Image (cartoon, helix red, strand yellow):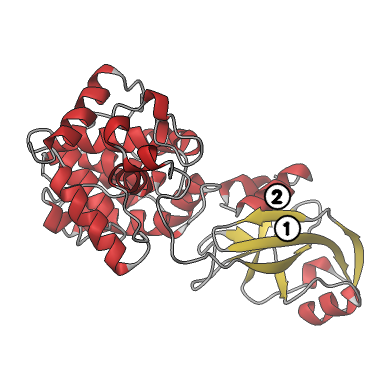
Amino acid sequence: MGNSWFSDTMLQWNREVNERQMPWKGEKDPYLVWLSEIILQQTRVEQGLPYFMRFKETYPTVRHLADAPEDDVMRLWQGLGYYSRARNLHGTAKHIAQELKGNFPNTYTEIVKLKGIGPYTAAAISSFVFGERQSVVDGNVIRVLARVYGISLPFDTTEGRKEFDVLAQKLISDKHPGEYNQAIMDFGATVCVPAKPKCGECPLADRCVAYKENRQDELPVRAKKIVKKERFFYYLVLHDDREIIISKRGPGDIWQGLYELPMIEAEKPIRKNVKKTVSEYLGEDCEVLNYSKPYTQQLTHQTIQSVFIFVKPVDFQQTKIEGAIRAPLKKLPTFGFPKVVHLFLTENSLL
């Protein structure tokens, strides 16, 4: 009858077959569900799980997170990427603690108004915690629906996204919306996977358009091709036995709020006149001692190529770089660094 077969099948699979265990499953604290969903955005469960456990232990309530210094939050988030998520998480925690008196909103309409919380996360919280009939639509859900229903509209267009949203809302279980949402997400993550889906184990196979037409590799359809740019970062390593010069990244670019070493960004690799380039940046003469190996960090839309240049200025104690600070080497672990900088500092026994 109608589309109930789909939700009934998902619920049955979840109860009888699904073995995917995660610490936030069944959680009824909206703060912890929110925390897990923000961490898992654009992050694999295997990578996000230890971060969730550390955040839960360090900041067990929204008030604990709200009271934390931003640098501490960013340091705990270090290595997870997409750092705007951490800033929004912290800022919204402050809003809930201060403006809402610590009371987390309990409806989709109010939750989606919070900064950093979009329709997907709001639907997850409202359905998991408060039992609202709001469908979640993430990459896993889109893939399942595109294949089962043979949807060829690109999901990354306005028209395509609307079709997926409307269909997802039609299919969600009336009685068990939270369980259904978790089930279809888990199903997309474990059975209807992007490459080599497990069609032989799929309880939807007899009704799946993609399976019948052998189109699993074609669906879902993406209209826009991701264009990636390459950036070249040259970090200057300036330190003595006690201190090292670092700076905090400002707004408007990647890694906002994290610390790094003084950096020269170039449009293309610097192959000549390195000493001159570094001296001009410092505003004083210097000696280039050595170079690190190249470090590459792949972001969603960017590839960061980094080289660390060991520099000896005329007088380290007199060297001044605008916006930079001198950090005691023994306190470096208290700062949050981008993954590539953290890796360099660790490999060179500076961290």
Name, please, the residue furthest toward the front. Answer: 213
Is residue 314 visible to us here? yes
Amino acid on which the number 1 mark rests in the picture:
Ile
The earlier-in-sequence mark between 1 and 2 is 1
Quick one: label 1, few (<14), some, or many (20+) residues within 10 Å?
Answer: some
Task: Indicate the position of residue 28 as horizontal and vertical percent values.
Answer: 19, 33
x, y percent for residue 306: 74, 60
Front in this rendered view, residue 186 or 45? 186
Q: Quadrant of the C terminus?
A: top right
CA neighbours of label 2 inside 10 A, class few (<14), some (14 to 19), many (20+): some
State the CA–CA distance, disc 1 to disc 2: 6 Å
Name the residue that disc number 2 marks: 329
| 306 left or right, relative to 57 | right
Q: Does 61 sit left or right of 77 as displayed?
A: left
Q: Amino acid at mark 2?
A: Leu
Q: Is residue 275 above or below residue 28?
A: below
Secondary structure at numbered mark 1: strand
Please give left or right for residue 85 compared with residue 326 in the image: left
For disc 1, the marked residue is: 244
In this picture, is 188 found above or below 72?
above
Q: Tell which of 150 and 288 is nearer to you.
A: 150
The reply to whether discs 1 and 2 touch (Cβ–Cβ < 8 Å) is yes
Residue at image coords 40%, 51%: 220
Along the line of sight, which residue is nearer the eye, 283 or 159?
A: 159
